[in-house]
Image (tube, rainbow, N blue to C red):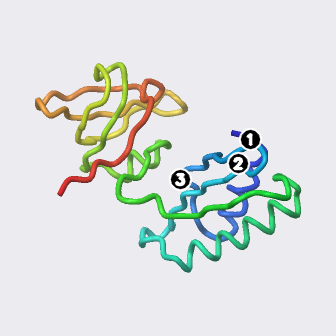
């Protein structure tokens, strides 16, 4: 992902009082799609109104700063039930919940309970409990993909 583009999006969301959960580029070269997943800072659920406010503001900023071509699609949504976990703050926020984690330290993908976060300054590790009841520390650098796990 283009760092300058992500910076512009993050700045605009910050100005509006939202956090960027995920920014993905999709679509084709001729018609790119930018997918933004946002979160409210007050912990409330993201509404359609929130998505509309963010979409209009981000679109204006992207076009003003010419960060995208004339033909693109901007999609703004909530992170959803199985929200991605990227940042240390995400892991701290969801301590006590279950996550689906892809890591070589887990021999692939496993569903775990998030127990906590240790370390600082880019050397953080998550502490999890596996389905077998084993506590394990995994460096965040070793986490390839992680999402909250939704169970019925």
Cβ–Cβ below 8 Å for labels 2 and 1? yes
Q: Tell me the CA gap for discs 1 and 3.
A: 15 Å
Tell me which label, 1 or 3, sits earlier in the chain.
Answer: 1
> Which residue is disc 2 drawn over?
6
Dot 3: element: strand
- Residue 117, image x, y percentages: 36, 38
Residue at image coords 73%, 71% = 57
Tell me which label, 2 or 3, sits earlier in the chain.
Answer: 2
- Residue 126, image x, y percentages: 35, 34
- Residue 84, image x, y percentages: 44, 47
> Which residue is disc 3 drawn over?
21
Q: Tell me the CA gap for discs 2 and 1.
A: 5 Å
Residue at image coords 43%, 45% = 85
> Which residue is disc 1 drawn over?
3
Residue at the far bottom in the pictured view: 49
Dot 1: element: helix
* Image quadrant where one finds the N terminus: top right
Q: Which image quadrant for residue 152?
A: bottom left
Q: Tell me the CA gap for discs 2 and 3.
A: 11 Å
Dot 2: element: helix
Instruction: Say whether residue 7 is left or right of residue 117.
Output: right
């Amino acid at each position: 992902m283009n760092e300058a583009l992500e910076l512009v999006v993050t700045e605009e969301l910050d100005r509006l009082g939202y956090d960027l959960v995920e920014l993905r580029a999709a679509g084709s070269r001729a018609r790119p799609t930018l997918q933004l997943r946002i979160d409210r800072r007050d912990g409330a659920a993201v509404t359609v109104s929130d998505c509309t406010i963010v979409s209009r503001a981000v679109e204006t900023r992207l076009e003003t700063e010419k960060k995208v071509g004339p033909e693109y699609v901007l999609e703004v949504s909530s992170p959803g039930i199985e929200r991605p976990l990227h940042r240390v703050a995400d892991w701290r926020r969801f301590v006590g919940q279950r996550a689906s984690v892809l890591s070589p330290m887990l021999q692939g993908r496993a569903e775990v309970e998030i127990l906590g976060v240790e370390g600082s300054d880019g050397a953080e590790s998550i502490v999890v409990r596996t389905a077998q009841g084993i506590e394990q520390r995994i460096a965040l650098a070793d986490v390839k993909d992680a999402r909250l796990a939704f169970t019925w």
